[in-house]
Structure formats: C-alpha cells, structure tokens
Image: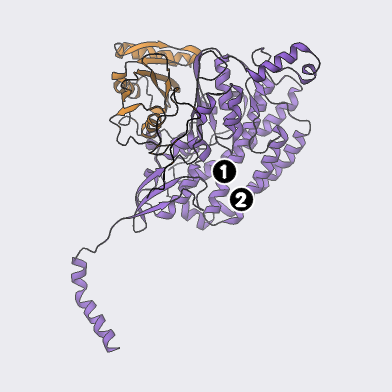
C-alpha cells in the first residue's frame, strides 16, 4: 500500500515531464483481406493506421483475374456472352445486355420491340437483385442479421422470377446478339405479380428495421464521403455519383432500348456519404419494380411477336426445322461452329448497370472472332477513390464504405 | 448525339488541328486520332474548353494491332455531364518505344486505368506516379493482352511474399 502511494506520487511528479517528452508512437500497417469475413469481395487492403484512424490505404485488386478479355479474343462473338454473365454475377443480364448492344451496334441491328421490353424487364430484375445483395450484405457485415435475411429472401423471389424468365437463377445467359433466348413464359405475369407484392412487403420490413435504426445510421451517416467534384474527377458513376447529387443515369441521359417510354425517377442524394448511397439504392429498388411492372403490362398488351431480329447473319433457325430440313441444319451448324461475321469497325456502348456505367468497347477486324472486347468495369473504377473516402475515418468505417461501393470481384478483376 | 460529337470534332480541329491526324464518326461515335506527343494537351483542352466540357474520363484502354506500325493504339473515352456527349480519343505508339504521356494530372481516375493498360499491354505512361501492375502480380512475365502472347502460356511459380 505504501509502495503504491509512492508509485502514484512518483507518477504525479513526472507527469509534466511525460507530456513534454514526445511519446514513442508509430503508424501501424494492417493487412485486411484478400479473404476477410467482413468484406464480400476478394480484395486486399493495406491500411496505415494511427490508433484507429486511417492515415493511408492501398488497395490491391486482381485476385479474381481470369483473363476475360483474352478469352473473348479466342472464341466466336456468341461465345463471349456466357463470360459476361460472370463479370457482375449479381446482375448478369445487365452485362449480357451491354455486350450484345455493342455487337449489335457493329452489326447495325435494330431488335424487335418485344425483345426490347424483355431486355428491360430482365435488366431491372437483375438490378433489383444486385441492390438487395448490396444492402442486405452491408447490414450483415455491420452485424445486423435480420435485415440481411429480409434482403436475401427478397432476392430469392427475384431470382425465382429470373429463373422463370431465363431458366437460370444467377448466370442467366439470357440476352443474345439480335434478341433474347426465348419469349416470356405464359406463367410469368402471374408469378411476377405474386412475387413483386412479396418483395414490396419485404422491402417495407427492411425499411422498418434499417432506415431509421440508430446503430445503422450512426455507422453510415457522415462516413465514406466523396464530394460531387471528386466523384467527377474520379469518373465515379452509378449510385455513388447519384448519392453525391449528380442526377446522371444513362437510362435517362442516353435512353437505350425502350427506357424513353417508361415512367421512372432517378433518386439523388445530397452529401454523398454511405447513408445517401443506401437511400439511393433503396429508392432505385422501388423504381426497378415500377419499371418491371410497366414491362409486364406492356408485354401482355403487345401480344405474341418476334423476340429475335430476322437477320440471316445472327438468326438461329427454329428447332423443328433444323431437325427436318437440310438448309436449316446447315445454317444451325454454321451458326454454332463459325458464328456471325461482324463488320470491321469499333463501337462503344454504355448501359446503366447496378454499379454504374458498364461500357463495352468492341473492335472487329471483320472476322468471326472478336479482335478486342473491352469491358469498362464500374466496380474497378468506383473502387479507386476509396482511400479518399476513408482517410481520416475510423477503421470500422471501411466496412460500410466498401459495402456501398459494392465492388464485385468478378467485374473488378475480370 | 452525332451533332454534339461532330461539334466537338470541329472545335478540336479549329484549335488543335496540327495535333489531329484523323477524325471520323462511324456508327455515331465521334472519334479523333491524335499525335501521341500531344495527347495531354488535347485531353486537357477537351476537358477545359467552355464549349466541350468533357469533364469525365470514362475509360482508358489499348488495342494491339500487331501487324501494323505503330502497333499499339491507346483509346480514351470521354463523357460530358454538362452537355451529354461523348468523344473517343486515340493515339498510336510504336512497339519499339510504347510510351505515351500520362493523363493522371488531368483526371486522377486515369491512375488505375493506365496501370491496367501498362499491366496487360506493356504501354508505359510517362509521368505516372505509381506505374505498377494492378491485376497481375509483379513476377508475371509478359503482357497477356498482346496478340503475340499465347493464351496457353504457363507462368513460373512464385513463392509466398512477405
């Protein structure tokens, strides 16, 4: 006891000296990833920390690099479509669509109206699934299990619809050059109405537990801010750019397919923090459902019609004719083994994917094999300014920021 | 959109005519091929000019025209939020010295895009602050998107790094 007092005494004596002397502190380097339980993407962060504050961040990507562009240069134009499914595997139809629109631009094809509505429908279901994953997983990684389950349940319903439409839940391979794989099945509208109503209920439940939840709001409001000007300088697109207050949405700016005939709004945020990104995504889900409603109505009103362009370069003959007639058999054989010859030239098309501007720059030398297929990956480009978003924030803020950037390894690393 | 694009091309020809080698608007994509030594001033002009305002660099990539000379074509896609138009800027660099000036000073987003082009095509960007490989690892040999890189080629095994 006496000793204790003496120790305390001595400490008080030296307090002044201690404060004068510079304590030995140094920045700590922390390795996070490439496979970290709180990030849903294979990426490695090298974080320089001062206590718990982030001083610097180096992002290392490429763990999922599979040589997408190289692989595309060795098959036919058709054979690249399944690879595009695996870019952003949360919203495969949007990637199919981006690639096919670029090739159609080179071929100078105009797809039938019914096909365009089907593509919009597929694309919006994809976007809905992608945003549900983003918001659900973000909650999970911030230790909220319940909203994650709501989100994933809604995604299941959304994937059921995609399965009904394309025959596959995730890697849909639905959009084809000059059309889509097949028309809407007759059972689709009824299933759509049932599932859409349930998805809306789940979105309301999700909203109830998350949007004004104190813990959630504390973690996302004011974190990961990227200003409007920085978004533009860093080429950021999609919900991140809109959360910062720029109403840039390719569906409105350069309407492709039939988006100019559809009634929907583009939500924007104010400050560009994670909370704004969350609110923008939630509203976009409602808008996607609104667009899908209009698509289903329109498809029912349109009645049966062609879903593939009637052009001999890309048309696949009907199966019953392939099995019974020589001409069609030969055409089928040539379509499969050789694929279409695409006129020489170059084309760039951009579609609004769930993450932002998904661009495809394709170059053809006039042969049946792509000369170059470049995918402009929104995840890759949106991830780049992440150090700017989190510098000065706490280590824990990396999680919501990374979640709302929604880096998808398949698309980022290609 | 063609109208905006051709306005951009005309304006560029007026001011930087000597740097421009060729323009076209095939398939509606306004395209300009420029002298690689003037790439930075052309890009800066496109961003800063009051009539053009291409404030976003959407993409940087390259194409390997293996049988032509100059061999590599660096391709930039720009977009203007204010005026909602696009332009594509291209410049050819030779195989012997595949070097072009970096656009990082104009758009910080060029950083990763140029690193990717360097990684996959081996085109060097002069003045880039941090020109490392990005998708592949440092020990990777060659540049895989070059047409003379065989798809089946094996890479040497590398051990763990600290």
Residue A360 located left or right of residue A149: left
Decide if residue A112 is in sight here.
Answer: no
Q: Find residue A138 and report its horizontal and vertical position in percent.
A: 53, 49
Which residue is located at x 61 percent, y 55 percent? A146
Q: Are marks 2 and 1 in contact (CB under 8 Å)?
A: yes
- What is chain A's hue in the picture? purple
Q: Find residue A102 and report its horizontal and vertical position in percent.
A: 54, 21
Tag 2 residue:
A206
Q: Which chain's colour is orange?
A: B
Label 2 residue SS = helix
Q: Nearer the viewer, residue B98 or A304?
A: B98
Label 1 residue SS = helix
| Label located before the other in sequence (2 or 1) | 2
Q: Name the chain under label 1.
A: A
Decide if residue A203 is in sight here.
Answer: yes
Q: Nearer the viewer, residue A345 or B71?
A: B71
Tag 1 residue:
A282
Name the mark on residue B42.
none
Graded by Cα atoms within 10 Å as few (under 14), some (14 to 19) or many (20 or more), the crowding at tag 1 reads many
């Amino acid at each position: 006891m006496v000793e204790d007092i003496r120790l305390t005494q001595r400490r008080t004596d030296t307090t002044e000296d201690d404060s004068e002397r510079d304590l030995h502190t140094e920045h700590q380097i922390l390795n996070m990833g490439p496979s970290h339980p709180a990030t849903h993407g294979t990426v490695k962060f090298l974080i320089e920390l001062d206590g718990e504050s982030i001083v610097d961040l180096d992002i290392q990507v490429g763990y999922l690099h599979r040589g997408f562009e190289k692989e595309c240069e060795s098959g036919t134009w058709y054979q690249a479509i399944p690879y595009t499914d695996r870019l952003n595997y949360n919203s495969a139809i949007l990637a199919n669509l981006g690639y096919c629109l670029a090739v159609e631009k080179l071929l100078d094809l105009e797809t039938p109206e019914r096909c365009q509505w089907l593509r919009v429908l597929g694309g919006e279901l994809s976007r809905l699934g992608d945003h549900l994953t983003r918001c659900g997983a973000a909650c999970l990684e911030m230790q909220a299990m319940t909203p994650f389950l709501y989100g994933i349940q809604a995604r299941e319903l959304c994937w059921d619809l995609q399965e009904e439409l394309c025959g596959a839940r995730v890697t849909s391979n639905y959009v084809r050059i000059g059309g889509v794989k097949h028309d809407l099945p007759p059972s689709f509208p009824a299933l759509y109405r049932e599932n859409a109503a349930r998805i809306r209920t789940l979105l309301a439940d999700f909203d109830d537990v998350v949007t004004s939840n104190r813990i959630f709001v504390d973690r996302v409001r004011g974190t990961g801010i990227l200003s409007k000007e920085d978004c533009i300088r860093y080429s950021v697109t999609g919900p991140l750019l809109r959360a910062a207050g720029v109403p840039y949405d390719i569906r409105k700016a350069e309407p492709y397919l039939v988006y100019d005939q559809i009634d929907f709004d583009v939500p924007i945020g104010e400050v560009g923090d994670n909370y704004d990104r969350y609110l923008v995504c939630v509203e976009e889900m409602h808008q996607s459902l609104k667009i899908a409603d209009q698509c289903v109505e329109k498809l029912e009103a349109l009645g049966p019609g062609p879903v593939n362009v009637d052009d001999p370069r890309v048309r696949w003959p009907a199966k019953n004719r392939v099995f019974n007639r020589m001409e069609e058999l030969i055409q089928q054989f040539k379509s499969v083994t050789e694929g279409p010859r695409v006129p020489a030239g170059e084309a760039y098309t951009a579609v609004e994917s769930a993450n932002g501007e998904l661009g495809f720059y394709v170059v053809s030398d006039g042969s049946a094999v792509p000369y170059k297929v470049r995918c402009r990956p929104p995840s890759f480009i949106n991830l780049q300014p992440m150090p700017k978003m989190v510098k000065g924030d706490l280590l824990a803020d990396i999680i919501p920021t990374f979640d709302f950037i929604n880096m998808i390894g398949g698309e980022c690393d290609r | 959109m063609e109208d905006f694009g051709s306005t951009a091309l005309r304006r560029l020809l007026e001011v930087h005519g000597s740097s421009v080698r060729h323009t076209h608007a095939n398939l509606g994509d306004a395209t300009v091929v420029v002298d690689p030594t003037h790439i930075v001033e052309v890009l800066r002009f496109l961003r800063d000019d009051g009539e053009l305002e291409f404030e976003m660099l959407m993409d940087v990539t390259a194409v390997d025209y293996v049988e032509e000379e100059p061999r590599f074509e660096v391709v930039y896609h720009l977009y203007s939020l204010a005026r909602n138009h696009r332009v594509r800027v291209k410049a050819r660099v030779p195989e012997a010295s595949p070097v072009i000036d970096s656009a990082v000073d104009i758009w910080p987003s060029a950083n990763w895009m140029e690193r990717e082009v360097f990684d996959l095509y081996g085109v060097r960007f002069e003045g880039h602050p941090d020109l490392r490989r990005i998708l592949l690892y440092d020990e990777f040999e060659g540049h895989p998107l070059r047409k003379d890189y065989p798809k089946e080629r094996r890479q040497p095994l590398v051990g763990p790094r600290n």
